[in-house]
Image (spheres, coloured by chain):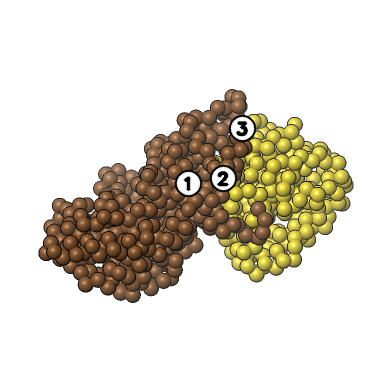
Chain colours: A brown, B yellow
Amino acid sequence: MAGSSDPGFDTLALHAGAAPDPATGARAVPIHLTTSFVFENSEHAASLFNMERSGHVYSRISNPTNAVLEERVAALEGGCGSIATASGQAALHLAIATLAGAGSHVVSSSALYGGSHNLLSYTLARFGIETTFVKPLDIDGWRAAIRPQTRLLFGETLGNPGLDVLDIPTVSTIAHDAGLPLLVDSTFTTPWLMKPFDHGADLIFHSATKFLSGHGTVIGGVLVDGGRFDWDASGRFPELTEPYAGFHGMVFSEESTVGAFLLRARREGLRDFGACMSPHTAWLILQGIETLPLRMARHVENTRKVVAFLAAHPLVAGVGYPELEGHPSHALAKQLLPRGCGSVFSFDMKGSRRQGQAFIEALKIFSHLANVGDCRSLVIHPASTTHFRMDDAALAAAGIKPGTIRLSIGLEDADDLVDDLKRAFKVAEKAA
Amino acid sequence: MKLQVDGREAYAYTGGKPFDSTLPCVVFVHGAGHDHSPWTLLARWLAHHGHGVLAVDLPGHRRSAGPLLPDVESLARWVLALLDAAGVARAALVGHSLGSLIVLEAAAKAPDRCSHLVMIGTAYPMKVSDALLATAAADPLRAMAMVNAWSISTLATKPGFPSPGNWHHGSDLALRRLVQASAPGVNLFHHDFDLCNRYAGGMQAAAKVRCPVTLILGCVDQMTPPRAARDIAAVLKARVVNVPGGHHMIIESPDATLAALRSALA
């Protein structure tokens, strides 16, 4: 390390957390597919178990390949560390379960991925954790929803499905004034588009399945701690500031002033819930991250071309992309997302559900499936798939119209994507 | 563990076990802009291997009440007062960076109370560049980033501190920010580096030390390069142990630092 500052984003994307393997000289990160690690002797074993030494014991708790991924994502986010999990859902669950228990309360944006909404609305409620949902742009609503039992505020950097930009500076201030952390789902933006810790967020999670991995190959998640939230000063988190009977009376905030949250999440949450990541998955996500800066730039470049095409097309009623002036989050997007608003967005087609289906079926380059953030372009018609049981009124309540179509723009030639869409519009027109 | 030192509350981490003043005692003193937390692995190991451990937060740093003390000599007197408060007659004194100057001065002021002196990441004089001090005064966050970059020798700290998956560059910056915030109205970061820069009593103190002395130095330390400790090592007749890593070798090479510390305390 030379110079007076840490390396830049592109360098960290390639090097953070990784060095040539000292045992073999391997330059790429080795995949440590092993359940467990040999102790040097009994004393060494005991000291690892008692956290007198750092090291790997069992791959549910930590693994060298996973650790490279964890350091790399933390480096890119500007955090103090992270934990790789089995999925983005597992990362969200780990964050909440580390800070909240029966009787606790969460304040969440209502503009969420459906899986997150299910977890908060139904599953965690079954375990006694209640959630109040507020519209992400309703600043007074965030403040009013906080209760004495509240343990965190939560939102997505770009909300689902309308891409409402979370006002992280304001919402984090509301959280901090109440002695609470702000957790954000940064899946759609990645640290290349926005670093939420710089704007006041305290915890971040990713579905690494999406842009971090980038190739639609693996399911994984990462939970990152900024290390700046003062758990002791808050006074609301005895899980971190008082002795934990499950680990020899350890007081996590004494063990690590900045890493208390991650220590508890790893020593309790990974240990007991067990939603860990396979080292092979970690390796594939690392491969993706090495080209994240290049891919995100191209994702955004392609998206802008497709958005411009759609916004001018006579069969399109509206495009929900925050860079467009009419979007409700346009001003916030300019402030928080100057590099772009990602490559996942929805547009509304004029016409019926049948026309929407015809449009999707006519596409040749866009793949019709339920994922986003792949290097290949993807499409889904919510009214005939994810929300097909809803009538038109219920769809409207969910912010979805019969002609709403969600795109995830990939890395193909933008002209080919536009041609594909043009062809599909013609087919849809004939299906009227 | 909370103690009353000079009428104010002082905090010392005890290694995950209740402090026992009848055991051989080791006192850890942190560096500029830090608190006790970089010591926790070493402290836990010693506490679970027959030692009483006190890893302090210096006055005005996080859990110990302020105010900040004005010079290394005052901090050395505070360390000795802390021993009194803990009921400890004699202890091994271990310090990192600024902390190494404090324990040197304490060992000189009370030679009979210091069983071993261990100076980690040390140099004398510990001059701080005018550019860094000026930046620390005007833009502490920028100065913290500079110190961070100079203190950590690698982008791949293994096996990770305090556990795998931690990004040391981010951890250290976050720690400095939290410690700075614990002294409202005061630029703690600048204050601490100014203490290092102003301390002028090192050679006189070294001449008074009577216990075994070990210097543990990072091989590629850019903040306190090993060559900058040669003169003080000679006066102290110290054993010098070089370990892999930079100025933050405690965190970059925790096992090597533990091995060096164990041999120093043997």
> Is A111 on the left-hand or right-hand side of B49?
left
Label 1: few (<14), some (14–19) or many (≥20) C-alpha neighbours in 10 Å: many
Q: Name the residue under label 3.
A: B48
For the residues labelled 1 and 2, the Cα–Cα distance comes to 10 Å
Q: Give the number of the mark in front: 2 or 3.
A: 2
Q: Mark 1 points at which residue?
A: A286
Q: Which amino acid does label 1 sit on?
A: Leu
Q: Which residue is drawn at 15% across and 52% down?
A: A389
Q: Which residue is drawn at 25% across and 48% down?
A: A122
Residue A398 location (% of width, % of height): 21, 60
For the residues labelled 3 and 1, the Cα–Cα distance comes to 38 Å
Q: Mark 2 points at which residue?
A: A18
Q: Of all residues shown, which one is farthest toward the bottom?
A: A325
Secondary structure of the residue carrying numbered label 3: loop
> Is B78 on the left-hand or right-hand side of A93?
right
For the residues labelled 2 and 3, the Cα–Cα distance comes to 32 Å
Q: In this view, does A427 lie above or below B164?
A: below
Q: Quadrant of residue B144?
A: bottom right
Q: What residue type is labelled 3?
A: His
Quarter of the image with the C terminus of chain A in it: bottom left
Residue B33 location (% of width, % of height): 65, 56
Label 3: few (<14), some (14–19) or many (≥20) C-alpha neighbours in 10 Å: some
**Residues at badges 1 and 2 in contact (C-beta under 8 Å)?**
yes
Q: Mark 2 lies on which chain?
A: A
